[in-house]
Image (cartoon, rainbow, N blue to C red):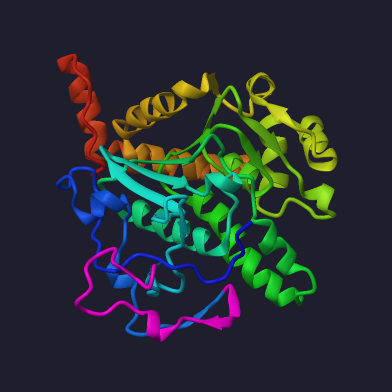
Amino acid sequence: MQGIGCAPHIRSTISFADHDAPPGSPATAATLVVWPDMLPASPRHCKYDDSRQYDDSRRQSENSSAGELIQGRALDRVWGFMQIPFARTKGGAMEAEVIIEKKNGIGRITFNRPHIKNALTPPMLGQVMDAIARFDKDDDVRVLLFSGAGGSFTSGGDLSFLRDMSGKKPFEIKRTVYTYFAGTAKAIKLCSKPTIAAVAGPAVGAGCEYAIVCDFRIAGESAMFCETWANLGLIAPLGGMFLLPRIIGLGRATDMLLRGTRVYAEEALRIGLVTQVVPDAELDQAAMKLAAELAEGPPLAYTSLKEGLRRGMESNLNAEWEFNLYAQAMLINSDDYTEATTAGKEKRRPKFKGKR
């Protein structure tokens, strides 16, 4: 199983990976979103492993082409405070451990370590958090879709990372767990745009929590949700203890959290953990269909609805009414509301622009 040491990654000059890019271009080939402005001028220490430094001798020269390998390895470059994690495939090529795509208003983030059921490392989650932040600010992105490659959503944290946590000081654990694992859960939950988890195979531990913090969960028939924390002598720290009882009820949530009970697709549908179950072969199509529907919806209203739902879980009814009145007043004065009423009169589908 791969550890969490510094991983090689792609050259910073690769541009925003939109599917409208010319076929065969570096961005299309890598299907990665890379924002070069996040790259500092020189290497720094890995924040998830302070014992290792980036090797200046392996940095890519200014004349190297995108994706070029030197001495059989992709070159290290710093991306913000993290590296873009790559893994070597069976054929020896380098493949992104997180695939980030943008097409037709949908921002898609795919965990891509199928050989170990998409186990998560801090470098992966650093990239995920930054992608969420970028998509959240991008007016061309209306909805975010999370999925896993190779028939698994994600099996949670990489065991090598979890083993490395043993013996660490509390502040070190907080820095790593909170910054990356809890930070990703928070980024998903607080995203102003609708979020969808397309779950096939295991969604275990952190993977289960990341599905839970999404607004929508669609399951393939092979999906399995499991909160394994108590089996490791831990608690579910990423939001599951707060959200799961509100989604499936206190009794079932207690069973999942204390006993680590596995919940498979059909039961997940029955108890309300997911909204739809489809054959695995149809999961991607079903998730994209829902994403396309949401991408055509009213973005301003979605943002206010999400905020209202979140506040409703965290506040009292009077505070909720106050927020709702303010939000509704803002929305009634928006271009989206005018477009919706006009479209109704003209008997056509509204074309929402997300403008106030």
Q: Nearer the viewer, residue 219 or 341?
A: 219
Is residue 291 magenta-colored?
A: no
Residue range corresponding to the magenta coloring:
48-72
- Residue 1 percent coordinates (x, y): 64, 56
Establish if 172 lies above or below 180: below
Residue displayed at 58% across by 54% down: 120
* 10 on left or right of 85: left
Q: Is residue 39 above or below residue 313?
A: below
Q: Is 180 on the left or on the right of 159, as rendered?
A: left
Q: Main secondary structure of the magenta part?
A: loop
In this rendered view, identify the residue nearer to me: 117 or 335. Answer: 117
Q: Is residue 54 visible?
A: yes
Left or right: where 287 falls relative to 186: left
Is 197 or 301 nearer to us in this picture? 197
> Looking at the image, which is closer to me, 23 or 256?
23
The image position of residue 179, as x and y in percent, is 58, 66
Q: Quadrant of residue 26?
A: bottom left
The residue lying furthest to the top in this view is: 347
Q: Give me the residue at 37% from left, 74% from top.
A: 77
- Relative vertical location of residue 33 with respect to residue 291 in this rendering, above or below: below
Q: Where 108 sits versus 344, above or below?
A: below
Q: Is residue 320 visible?
A: no
Q: How many marks?
A: 0
Q: What residue do we see at 31% from left, 77% from top?
A: 60
User: Where is residue 315 shown, x and y percent of the image?
Assistant: 63, 47
Residue 68 shown in magenta: yes
